[in-house]
Amino acid sequence: MVIFMKKSMQLYIHIPFCVKKCAYCDFLSFAADEKIQDAYIAALQKELDFYGSKYSDRYISTIFIGGGTPSWLNEGSMASIMDCVYRNFEVATDAEITIECNPGTVSDAKFIVYKEIGINRLSIGLQSANDEELKILGRIHTFEQFLRTYDKARHHGFYNINVDLMSALPGQSPEGFISSLKKVVRLKPEHISAYSLIIEEGTPFYDKYQKDVKLREAGCKTTMLPTEEEEYQTTKWTQELLQEKGYHWYEISNFAKPGKECRHNIGYWKRADYLGVGLGAASLIDNVRYANTRDIYAYIDCPEKATLQERMYGWNAVESREVLSRDAQMEEFMFLGLRMIDGFHREEFEKSFGVAIEGVYGTELKRLQQEELLLQKEGRIRLTEKGIDVSNYALSQFLLS
Amino acid sequence: MSIDQSKIRNFCIIAHIDHGKSTLADRIIEHTGTLTSREMQAQVLDNMDLERERGITIKSQAVRIIYKAKDGEEYIFNLIDTPGHVDFNYEVSRSLAACDGAILVVDAAQGVEAQTLANVYLALDHDLDVMPVINKIDLPSAMPDEVAQEIEDVIGIEAMDAPRISAKTGLNIEDVLEQIVNKIPSPTGDADAPLKALIFDALYDSYKGVIVFCRIKEGTVKVGDKIKMMATGASSEVTEVGYFGAGQFISCDELSAGMVGYICASIKNVRDTQVGDTVTNANKPCTEALPGYKKVNPMVYCGIYPADSAKYPDLRDALEKLQINDASLHFEPETSLALGFGFRCGFLGLLHLEIIQERLEREFDLDLVTTAPSVIYRVHKMDGEMIELTNPSNLPDPTEIEYMEEPIVSAEIMVTKDYVGSIMTLCQERRGVYISMEYLDANRALLKYDLPLNEIIYDFFDALKSRSRGYASFDYELKGYERSELVKLDILINREQMDALSFIVFRDNAYERGRRMCERLKEEIPRHLFEIPIQAAVGGKIIARETVKAMRKDVLAKCYGGDISRKRKLLEKQKEGKKRMRQVGNVEIPQEAFMSVLKLDED
């Protein structure tokens, strides 16, 4: 008897549409009419068809439907996308299947369909429990609307819910954020993501707050954004509060009830193979990184234009393809792996690259330990709390070139 | 083939900066068909990238032009372009020595300016005939007749029949060419006498060795001759002679008295060739060398270090190569605790410094760290010894010093009357001593001040420009040394003294400068994982302090949909930033910080 073992792969599906773009957002998302949405879904299905046959030797371990606001799509469209996934791929029976939802875009009907099509995890973008702050961010919902969405989700049987929160908002004090956090903790979601707002170039926030960003970078007093000292306080309090409430701090910005850690995201940090479909989606398969075009019209038109030759590397929406060198793989292993609070075991490194970690990163590890940013214990290597605080600095040390 | 001396005209063009000297040169070249217009790129004589970008002429350039005059004869013009900026008077002087006459370009709207005068006097010093040309008559504000009158009144040369032209549009260029034939004298000199040629420039070519640019004063030189440099004594065999096409070398059989051209003699050692030296025939030498040039001494010094210490030998080679045609550049090795091995370099002025720095970076692909410029101070010690101090960190202990002197310049500032007040304030702020003021006409005043050189080397030009909205022009010459109350300001970073950041300052300004220096460095030095004190001290006493706070939080944003490329870019940027840093002790200092003292008067 031949035992045929399929390799696993994660699947990311990008839905770039939003009711309205938020003032801080620089993700690939925008408002679009129904005609474009339909054309997009059709293109997406063709892409899924293509990869379904290309990766028939794989099974899907997790699915993440992100955006944009995937919950804005009507339930019929979402069902057709998932049908297409099931038609083309073997999805593990225990697969974690997440969809991102924004308060105010989900109805009973949608939740019912989500359940039917196998979605078992929701990630709700709340960002703040303070309506004033939601307004500043340009969000389309209030806290009250979030509560209704949350209740509805529970009512429909979703028992794996993440709530996204954002700190370091303009005018927000550490106490202000903690009060938002407490309101969320009371609801006992299984997972909480707590990110700091990053002011990204090309967003309305950048035009408004770039001066403050420079001041903050220099460690100076700011006018609207919290100072670095306040941000530091916020993250410390967040870490304390959530751990006290029984959440497991497993990644720099992520907390979960034990066993509810997001398997899909952990895959990114551990460099599992993943296939990204949709506009601008990124993939990592067998140490090759791919990214799709970010041009919506090019993406929609792309199936018609496809020729076999253009498909040499995959679906012809692929715009960039990088075969990772051994150095690049090692760099990624380090700066992604160390985002996990538990870090990694030195044997994992050795197994992946055939050399002891000291042979590659001896001086960096030594220096970071001297600076008390990194810890080695029982073969595990991880950042210290101080190292997590300044993780940009710590992680950049592992770039080899 | 011998050339009739009476058909040769060797001349240069002199002008105040921006009066259109290089444009006129272009037009002459174009008009005589030396280049077809397709070959013509704006300002062909300024062939260094840097010159074109800045619109100024740094190195002198030469070109040979054939002109068929109205008398039916063909003439050979050797046109030598000259720089206009005060820092490069030395270069001007070199070009003039190769000429018999000079075209003086005066802007029909601006009239006679400070540099117009300075250049005319230089030309007259070299016994050149000066032929005025009034340019930019196409401007609405042009007043050619008034300007002609002004030239006669202020300079005292005949100007009524000066060609009135527009070099930009090409109007009346023919007049200029005809006057060159009629007004510039032809060269003299005996083609059969022993060779006597003045080196007015040189260039290093990796195939041909040193290419010597010279004016043959007496005698003849041809391939196969054995030549000798009179000052250095080096001799070698001539492999090629020729003249200058526009932007290219054209070889010929021989160069004889009166001609301008180049000589190649496989000279590999750049130190064998000195601009200003006389070339003669080794077998039939002339009795005495030409007078050469007045030796010019550097006024401003700074330390230049390779950013990558392994590039030290490359930096030395580069400086040597630049020095062969820029004798005013001085350098000697020095070491710094903070910066390692480098050179203390001397320059004619700040623009000269900047040009050299940029040429090193561009032409030799070097990454440099430059320390703050300093003038030469005279330190009189208790034991009677006098030291000429070019590097502040070499200042002896204060107890050994009896007194110090600093260089003072006589400055002339021409300014329109609306800005007299603000320029006088500026001069006061820079410790200037008022000498006189006279009105040149109803609108323009000439201010004379004595100013300490160390007050003008940093940013005086910029301050002058901004406070007069560009209407002031400035010229200075060294007056002498005067006793002054000077102290050395030291900078300590993380309690370690940074020798490369020390500078000499007037005692009463020490506190203010120290305070601003600390503020400036606080902005330049990135935050570390620990707190870094920055202190300014005079004689061991701390007079100012700032602190670079420790970095507390620096975390990446959300990683979205597995797109890690942005994360990597951010980390790369963070790491890249470190490459531009100098590690001193356990502090990383950006290279720009070593120039901080230059920026003290900004904002």
Image (cartoon, coloured by chain):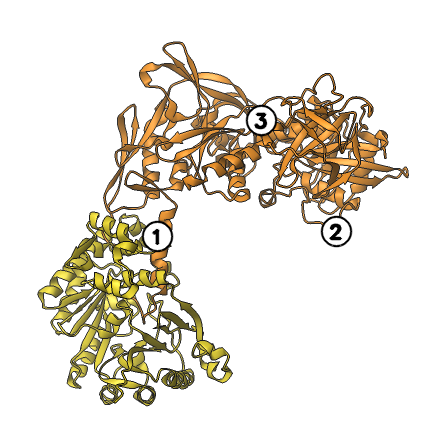
Chain colours: A yellow, B orange
Residue type marked 2 = Ser
Badge 1 and badge 3 both on one subunit: yes
Q: Which mark is residue B499?
A: none
Question: Which badge, 3 or 2, is on the more N-terminal residue?
Answer: 2
Left or right: residue B10 compared with residue B236: right
Q: Chain of mark 1?
A: B
Image position, residue B589 (x, y; %): 34, 41
The answer to which image quadrant residue A401 occupies is bottom left
The residue positioned farthest toward the top in the image shown? B384
Question: Which badge, 1 or 3, is on the more N-terminal residue?
Answer: 3
**Crowd around label 2: few <14 · some 14–19 · many ≥20 (10 Å):** few
Image position, residue A88 (x, y; %): 34, 87
What whole-number distance in Å separates the C-alpha atoms at marks 3 and 2? 42 Å
Left or right: residue B151 compared with residue A221: right
What whole-number distance in Å separates the C-alpha atoms at marks 2 and 1? 49 Å
Secondary structure, mark 2, is loop
Residue type marked 1 = Lys
Q: Residue at x 50, y 31 (%)?
A: B423
Q: Which mark is residue B575?
A: 1
Q: How many marks?
A: 3
Left or right: residue B138 compared with residue A237: right
Q: Is residue A200 visible?
A: no
**Crowd around label 3: few <14 · some 14–19 · many ≥20 (10 Å):** many
Question: Which badge, 2 or 1, is on the more N-terminal residue?
Answer: 2
Closer to the camera, B494 or B53? B494
Q: Residue at x 74, y 19 (%)?
A: B286
What whole-number distance in Å separates the C-alpha atoms at marks 1 and 3? 53 Å
Dot 2 and dot 1 residues touching (CB under 8 Å): no
Residue annotated with mark 3: B446
